[in-house]
Amino acid sequence: MKKIGVGLLGCGVVGEAVYRGLAENAKAISARCGFQFDVKKIAVNNISKKRVGVSGGLLTKKYMEVVQAPGVDIVVELMGGEEDAFTAVTTALKLKKHVVTANKLLLAKRGEEIFDLAQKAGVKIGFEASVAGAVPVIRTIKEAIASGKIKSVFGIINGTSNFILSSMMERQTTFADALEEAQNLGYAEADPTFDVAGIDAAHKLTILANLAFGTPVKLKDVHIEGIGLLTPDDFIFARQFGRVIKLLATAKNDDGKLDIRVHPAMVPANMPIARIDGVTNAVEVDVSDAGRLMLIGPGAGGDATASAVIADLVDIARDMAHCSSARVSPTGFLPHSRKRLPLKNIDSIKGGYYLRFTVDDKPGVLAKMAGILGDNGISIDSVIQKGRTGGIVPLVILTHEAVEKSVKKAINKIDRLSTSQARTMLIRLEDGL
Ligand code: NDP
Ligand code: HSE
């Protein structure tokens, strides 16, 4: 059996699962591509850490030793972070070695340089594992959709935050307990703020939008809000309105403008996306000729992510066998046909809104607020006011479709009233793109 040398950078949650997966599934893998993958060296930070089934002789602390090792044909970057990962990946590409990475932060921040380098070097960069874990969304957008124009990509692309939201909604778990559980299961980033603040989903969305619309996208182009400000009350009210709260990632080509954002949204409980729970991810792609495609599956965790990493290795092996590594460009578009789309300002979007005000429980408060909303062209769909306690109460309003700028202007004015006791919570309603 022909062998391909692999250098593993990182042997943590994903790296260890890749190592194990290559050994346990060697037969099935070679039946698909005619090669065996031989892990030659592994870079880690701490050589003394216990790693089940991994031979200590393969470990080194110097990642460059792995990248430069003569027998390493493919470098698999699973260290995470930016600087070391960038140095490792670009050095490998310059040495004309193929690269596989699961590092969405790296691709979101430095993807353009890396893709350009891979293209010039005529080698492959596989990054299926960087978005939605085991779900083959990169290959679908990059290769399977080839004739139609992609109108939008939307979905749930952070397993940790979806796990937290589902646990809070279904099991009334606290935020902190749900996050700890997700960390123990290997779903969270090294710094879990990336998950809960919406940054990890934004990293992934820049990658998807880049492939979907043939446009370079910068991280700062994405409007980002996380799930950290949601309170148990929001989940209770959502249920009363027949909705659930999801952290949605949306990228839409809106008449030539890119509408790109990550934020919590309230979706009707009977919408397919509402039923995506736990670590599961779902991505819906709306294509001009094909219609709506939805891909669903495990979005994080060692084994799920390793399956996508190994799929990239098999893909590279197949291309190596036919000397056709540059067959598909890294973004799926020819470099000269990519162009930057102007951005749509979030203030100009239109939609329904959930507004949770915190107000004095006094006569006339609701009437005053309704007046301010009306003055800004916002009409009310429904209102829930908690029982009369004479103290401070949440007062929730769902609006009909309104312009975001007007909604923010009205909230600003209401929050300055002497009867308002905390900043108003705004959650966008999403009834389908
Ligand atoms: P871990 O923190 O579990 O593993 C990171 C590994 O890299 C560890 O083995 C660590 O060594 C090693 N490492 C880190 N920095 C260096 C360095 N400078 N030199 C040598 N070794 C280094 O992370 P994960 O496995 O969870 O994630 C890896 C990558 O995959 C990240 O980019 C992450 O975003 C991405 N990813 C993760 C998913 C998941 O579900 N966990 C899913 C999809 C993508 P040591 O073990 O000694 O600490
Ligand atoms: N922390 C990420 C998540 C890992 O929870 O989705 C998968 O990319």
Image (cartoon, rainbow, N blue to C red):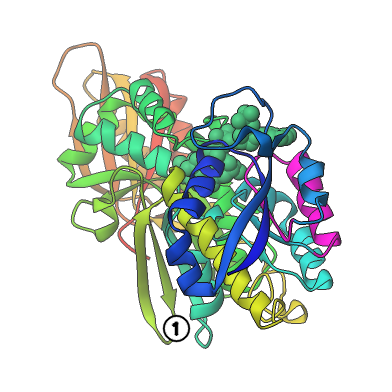
Question: Is 130 drawn above or below residue 366 in the view shown?
Answer: below
Quadrant location of the C terminus? bottom left
Residue drawn at point x = 52 percent, y = 59 percent: 310
Magenta-colored stretch includes residue 425: no
Q: Quadrant of residue 5?
A: bottom right
Question: Is 182 drawn above or below residue 282 in the view shown?
Answer: above
Residue drawn at point x = 37 percent, y = 65 percent: 295
Image quadrant of ligand 1 equals: top right
Residue 98 position in % (x across, y down): 72, 63
**375 or 21, which is in the foreground?**
21
Magenta-colored stretch includes residue 91: yes
Residue 405 position in % (x across, y down): 51, 49
**326 or 56, which is in the foreground?**
56
For disc 1, the marked residue is 288
**112 or 325, which is in the foreground?**
325
Look at the image and tell me whether residue 226 can be seen: yes
Q: Is residue 179 left or right of residue 334?
A: left
Q: Element type at marker 1?
A: loop
**209 or 11, which is in the foreground?**
11
Residue drawn at point x = 68 percent, y = 70 percent: 330
Inspect the image, locate mark 1, and give the three-letter code of the amino acid beneath it.
Answer: Ser
Q: Quadrant of residue 345?
A: bottom right
| Span highlighted in magenta in the image | 72-96
Question: Is 70 drawn above or below residue 382 in the view shown?
Answer: below
Look at the image and tell me whether residue 200 can be seen: no
Within-10-Å neighbours for mark 1: few <14, some 14–19, many 20+: few
